[in-house]
Amino acid sequence: MNDAAEQYVRLVLAMGEHDADYVDSYYGPAAWRDEVRAAKRSLDAIRTHAVALRETLGATARPAETIDGLRLDYVRRQTDALIARAEILQGRQLSFDEESKALYDAVAPTHGEDYFRTLNAAIETELPGSGPLVERVEQFRREFVIPREKLDATFGAAIDVCREKTADHMALPAGESFTVEYVTGKSWSGYNWYQGNFTSLIQVNTDLPIFIDRAIDLACHEGYPGHHVYNALLEKTLVRDRGWPEFSVYALFSAQSLIAEGSANYGIEVAFPADERVAMEKERLFPVAGLDPARAEQYYRVYDLISRTGYAGNEAARRYLDGAFTAEQAAEWLRTYALMEPARARQRVKFFDQYRSYVINYNLGKDLVRNYVERRSEGDAEKRWEVFAELLSSPRLPSGLV
């Protein structure tokens, strides 16, 4: 199996030579990357070799051992996604849902305007007044922007509390750490670049104002117990302890991303259930950011309602990428139903341009991971952490979460 896994890694690296976003991280042998670069394989050659690998994997008997069977399933599905991505780069046209199924092993539900109007009506009760709801939401949220001069201190405090909470419930690899950089000119708000050796570089985009909720969201999602912990546990348990090379590379446009993004988003809830989060932020984050802790409950009531509109982003992306919306119409949809102010909506459309159906991984991924963990933990908070940690350390696929 390791021979097939090495072939897979080399194919992912070869794809990265054609697609700058494809290889999200790699910490395997440097010689493999050097050899791949020297070979200069064409997309057609990559696809041909990937199809041959998939045929070999398909003919391989599934091991009786559960984790070894999951491993075979994982490499098969990741290879399927690699083939699909190669074909897309060669010009194959897929609908939004066809693409998400081919790459991420999942299809997001479809919601119409009435669904989002109902959600917006609930927000109206919290923010009554005249004028468009999106403007009232933006005016309200502007009162909770982290001042630029307090941003680093606030993120530092958020990271500290996220790590404390995670370390209380999960065994983190010795020596794990990450650094934070502030950047501009990106289509995303935050990004974890995993470096190997249990270290990450986390970048925070400061193009737009950053609201107080993003401190914990980014600290959890990108750090603890999100992407940084996920990658570190995969490196520890699968690459180092088991010697599985396929986890030394992360192909962004693959089923692994739904697990990665879904667990990173759900990890926020695991670490800080709603009531605990508000109490913690009132004590440890609002004061650092210079915001009034007495308004935390109101802010998070509105925040919770707005977060339920997340699937509006999927609808905007689906209609835009399927040709039913122009970029301007997609941004207007985001303003109307996701309640994004214009600059944030335009930034999101740029994300659609760059990452396409990847958007389903955040909300659908979170829902699938939440349902998987909650079914197995049966409402027990400590067991929830155990199931969550097991998921982060195993070769699970989205279709295996249902």
Image (spheres, rainbow, N blue to C red):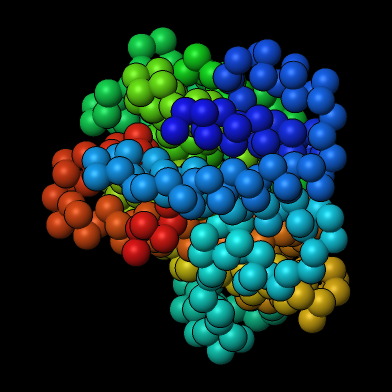
> x%, y% of residue 66?
26, 44
Q: Nearer the viewer, residue 207 or 102?
A: 102
What is the quadrant of the C terminus in the image?
bottom left
Q: Residue furthest top?
A: 175
Name the residue rendered at 32%, 30% in the picture: 166
The quarter of the displayed image where residue 162 is located: top left
Q: How many marks?
A: 0
Name the residue rendered at 82%, 34% in the picture: 41
> x%, y% of residue 148?
68, 32
Q: Nearer the viewer, residue 318 or 78?
A: 78
Name the residue rendered at 35%, 34% in the picture: 393
The quarter of the displayed image where residue 120 is located: bottom right
Name the residue rendered at 55%, 81% in the picture: 111
Does the image show residue 38?
A: yes
> x%, y% of residue 147?
64, 36
Q: Nearer the viewer, residue 36 or 171?
A: 36
